[in-house]
Image (cartoon, coloured by chain):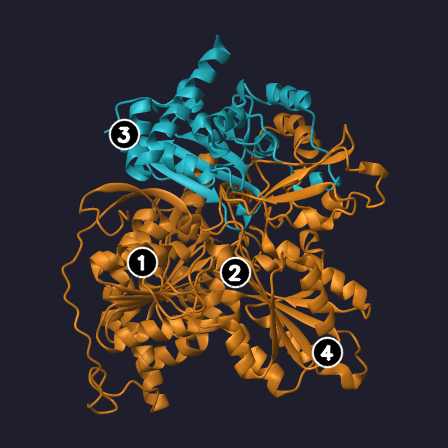
Chain colours: A cyan, B orange
Amino acid sequence: MVTTSLAADPYNMIITGVGGQGNVLASRIVGNALSDKGFHITIGETFGASQRGGSVMSHLRISTTSVLSPQIPKGKAHMVVALEPTEALRVLHQYGNRNTKMIMNTRPIYSVGVICGEYQYPAMEDVKRWGDQLTSASWLIDATDEAVKMGNAILGNVILIGALAAVGDFPLDKASFQDVITRTMPANKVDINLTAFEKGMEMVQQHAA
Amino acid sequence: MSIIGKAKEGERHLLMGNDAIARGIIEAGASVAAGYPGTPSSEIIENLAKAAKERNIYVEWSVNEKVAMEVAAAASFAGLRTVAVMKQVGVNVASDFMLHLSETGTRGGMILISCEDPGALSSGNEGESRPFAKLFEVPLLEPGDFQEAKDMTRWAFELSEKVRNLVMIRSVTRLSHASGNVTLGPLPDVVPHARFKFRGDEMDPDEGPVVTFPVAYRHTLMQTKLAQAVALFEDCPFNRYEGPEQPEVLIVTSSACYLYTKEAVDLLDVQDRVGVLKMGTTWPLPPKYMEKHLAKSKIIFTVEEVLPFMEDNVKILAAGLAERIGFKRFHGRGDGTLPAVNELNPDLVAAGLARILEMEYTAADPEYARLSEESAISGAPQRDLAFCAGCPHRASFWSLHNALEIDGREGFVCGDIGCYALGSRPTGFSVSKTGHAMGSGTGVASGFGKLGRFGMTQPVVSVCGDSTFFHAAMPALVNAVHTQSEMTMVVMDNSGTAMTGFQPHPGLTADAAGEEVPALDISDIARAMGANVDVADPFDLDTTQRKLLALLSKGGVNVLILKQACALSPEKKGKKLYNVTLDPAICLGENCGCNKLCTRVFKCPGLKWDSETKTAHIDELTCSGCGVCASICPSGAITKKEAV
């Protein structure tokens, strides 16, 4: 039986980004850590052709009672975790509401439409302003920059998982994260991922301070 | 490490639908599994391949889906449990054999798993294969959640052995690629022994030859088997009713739509007004069970993806039962209560149900929707599908585009299925002008190449990938050579079935389980067929364009193999061939006559246009170091140095 509480039951979270950023892995890690604690987890993933530079989304639903639809109903997300800024805006429009919280990586990934000048990538001030208007709380984090400092941009996803743990809407902690990555990752990757997780936690804590 | 083949009975795991199906296959003690890669089905065979050694399963990636089903059927004929796995379009390929298989019947339990893609999230169509179950008179099952995906798969083998015919399981992207908690069953101890018995009488189902004659007898047998399946479906734990005794609306649903329906009923808070009949056995529908539940309500709402398959069958049943259950009003995809195309979701089901119940329903807060519209429109520029940074296909299409333009006779490309289907889009410079099924590019080109007698002067080129070459393009090439067509086939050989995750194919030296196997050489095959064959590296733009241009006016059937591994392939990923740099002092930016050739036209995600300095830049994080852009920059601002 689950003894720990959720900020909402079911708790609906969307992890979004661009193909290749480790979106799917992030949802699996969080899902497995919470499944280990006895929660019912349902994850719906949109990938496939989207792995080639397209928008990707994982819908992660945490419940104490049952399996749920792998697609979250419109306007019903409690949390949006975005590996890419404009993907956050895309997801909020469909799944956000005034009480949605958001953790956003600030590193843009330009689509070919932007690269070739067909579309304009928004200014970061606008992204911040929209983020404030559309969420009840938001954490904008330079996760990719930190990940590059650690030696690999892909660690951005784990930094965001650390940030998510620090927000504390559900019982995700370092120990449960460590259990999952020890089980699922090669031994030589565990330490760097733990460091990234801690960095993410720290970044949210500093944000609040 | 694969938990699917090792985890013990009673353990609870968060599994993807495809993992759960693979576990069900292992729990059933299947000995043979064959498939062809295709999203969203590929992880099933991949999982089984990981468990192949420890569970003593023969697993293969077959050359195409028809052969996969034939390979799997052989095991059934020899008394083993066996499975064929494919995506929806694969069933079309396998369908010729499938009809004949249904006529001969099976021995060891045999199932077909079709993973389908409502909404075409990663397909060129949203076709479905459920009608094949009806067409070929085989039982059809559709799991409604992750636990069922495992349990139903296991049960399907028993069902197949009871009725002695193929059993079809249909999954969808939102189950196959979604995850949920699954409690595992026991791993069996099976010591399979294969022997094909054929010395019995022609009519002997256990020991006679496995042939479709005499046809009338076999067809009658098919229908008897189906009737046996229906009898079992009348009392089957995968069908259940949830709701009040006399609901205002009875929803009949299956598959992932069952989860959307439950959510929709909760969203509208109408649990006391609506009943949900969740069907796991969707063809044939068990008539007595259906009668009991259809009698509950005057309004029947069928929720399914994509075609109104179950809806039509419910209507047929209800028409026959009308004297006993009364006349019904039907809603579903047929009458516009649900959209006729695309995948469903909880909101679409809720909206449809609300209309039937004459309730108000808006998915999200309209004020929030208005507020978020500006940011979604101007803040989230569209992400069109594009070739990855360093993709050899971009370089190949660049050369194709240039060669066709220089040739100047309005030549064009016939494409088909694979990442290179993007040849019809901007990152493939829109050179592909036809695009259909696996291998169709070459078949269609073979046809165009015969139209010279009617005045057609345009040169025609087909493109196909290395896996597609073996899958379906070989017969088309044979046809082109034999009919003396005029065409050039470009094989974009990126060393694997790249789009679906680098599954091996007959051109490679490792099989599904990683064992060494002989590779078949595409150029040897094409040469043996009588084509004029050449090979080039697509990253060498000059040579590739020169060769292409020569082939366009050469006549006959030409094959050019453009060989370069996919940028995401395990051997290349994360490793750069070159360190590519751009000297902003040399880049003339907007003053260069090139009009931003590198970013505006070449469109590699590794390049950026800096709107402040008005010059191009290399995005270090995205650039994969193929070095091709160094060859296209007219002012020589981009340089490449071999990476160490």
The kind of residue on which mark 3 rests is Lys
Q: Is residue A72 left or right of residue B278?
A: right
The kind of residue on which mark 1 rests is Ala
Q: CA distance from mark 4 to mark 3?
A: 68 Å
Which is closer to the viewer, label 2 or label 1? Answer: 1
Q: Are marks 4 and 3 on the same chain?
A: no
- Residue tagged 4: B554
Which is closer to the viewer, label 1 or label 4? Answer: 4
SS of the residue at dot 2?
A: loop
Occupied quadrant, residue B578? top right
- Residue tagged 3: A37
Q: Are marks 3 and 1 on the same chain?
A: no
Chain bearing tag 2 is: B
Return the residue nearer the eye: B545 or B338: B545
- Residue tagged 1: B49
State the residue lying farthest toward the top.
A209
Q: CA distance from mark 3 to mark 2?
A: 40 Å
SS of the residue at dot 1?
A: helix
SS of the residue at dot 3?
A: loop
Chain bearing tag 4 is: B
Q: CA distance from mark 3 to mark 1?
A: 30 Å
The kind of residue on which mark 4 rests is Lys
